[in-house]
Amino acid sequence: EAEDEYHNFDALNTPADHPARDLHDTFYLEDTGLLRTQTSTVQIRVMEQTPPPIRIISPGRCYRKETVDATHHFAFHQIEGLYVDRGVSFADLKGTIEAMGRQVLGEETRVRFRPHFFPFTEPSVEYDFTCSICGGQNAACSICKGTGWVEIAGAGMVDPAVFEAVGYDPEEFTGFAFGMGLERIAMIRYGIDDIRLFLENDLRFTRQF
């Protein structure tokens, strides 16, 4: 969970002037390093040590200086996927996300991609799943607010600058990466309305599952 700036930022194409490096946004350690803000650091370390093809899942705890409320916490769990090989396409990414959505939230789940920006992927998207609670039929739904869509996380094709940082040839290899917060998925699947419940260690909450 403790990382260095290179693996958390530099190798992921996040320059020194990026807002995520602000002391107010990241927990820095007293001597050196920081508490990782994302599990993408695992992807960098794997690619540094392993030639393609690569297919990995990297789950773990992350930290960000967030104002704690019903949907945000300074500590949370994230899971990311990385696939690198010759000929990997954006269609492969979308098919993987759709299959994952159906497995996690049911066969009727649909996926929507929205253009976005992340420094470590290009092109980048945020993806939404259809609401498994109300299906967009309830304007008072605490999960989708009646829109029928729930924002899940980000994804995209690995930026060539990231491949260059780990010694991969971006002319030969392509890949995609995606991530999501585990607590957010559980909140959607089980109708949990407050993320703080996951870290309060209240047996009345955990025994429900």
Image (tube, rainbow, N blue to C red):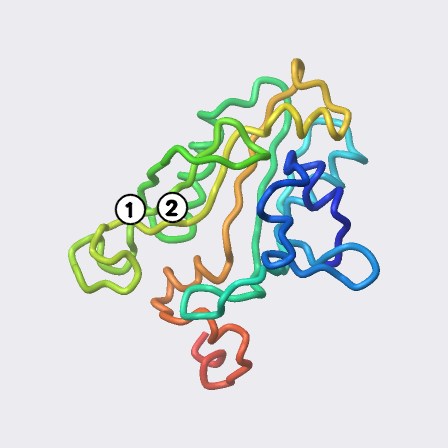
In the image, is residue 62 above or below residue 101?
Answer: below
Figure quadrant of residue 99: top left
Q: Are marks 2 and 1 in contact (CB under 8 Å)?
A: yes
Q: Which mark is residue 108?
A: 1
Figure quadrant of residue 31: bottom right
Q: Who's the residue at 51% across and 22% down the image?
A: 89
Q: Who's the residue at 57% across and 35% down the image?
A: 119
Looking at the image, residue 134 sits to the left or right of residue 21; the answer is left
Q: Who's the residue at 45% across and 47% down the image?
A: 153
x and y percent of residue 11 in the render?
A: 71, 36
User: Of marks 2 and 1, which one's residue comes earlier in the chain?
Assistant: 2
Q: How many neighbours does mark 2 have within 10 angstroms: few (below 14), some (14-19), or many (20 or more)? A: some
Mark pair 2, 1: CA separation: 7 Å
The kind of residue tagged 2 is Arg
Helix, strand or loop at mark 2 = helix
Q: Who's the residue at 67% across and 15% down the image?
A: 172
Q: Which mark is residue 102?
A: 2
The kind of residue tagged 1 is Glu
The total of numbered circles placed on residues is 2
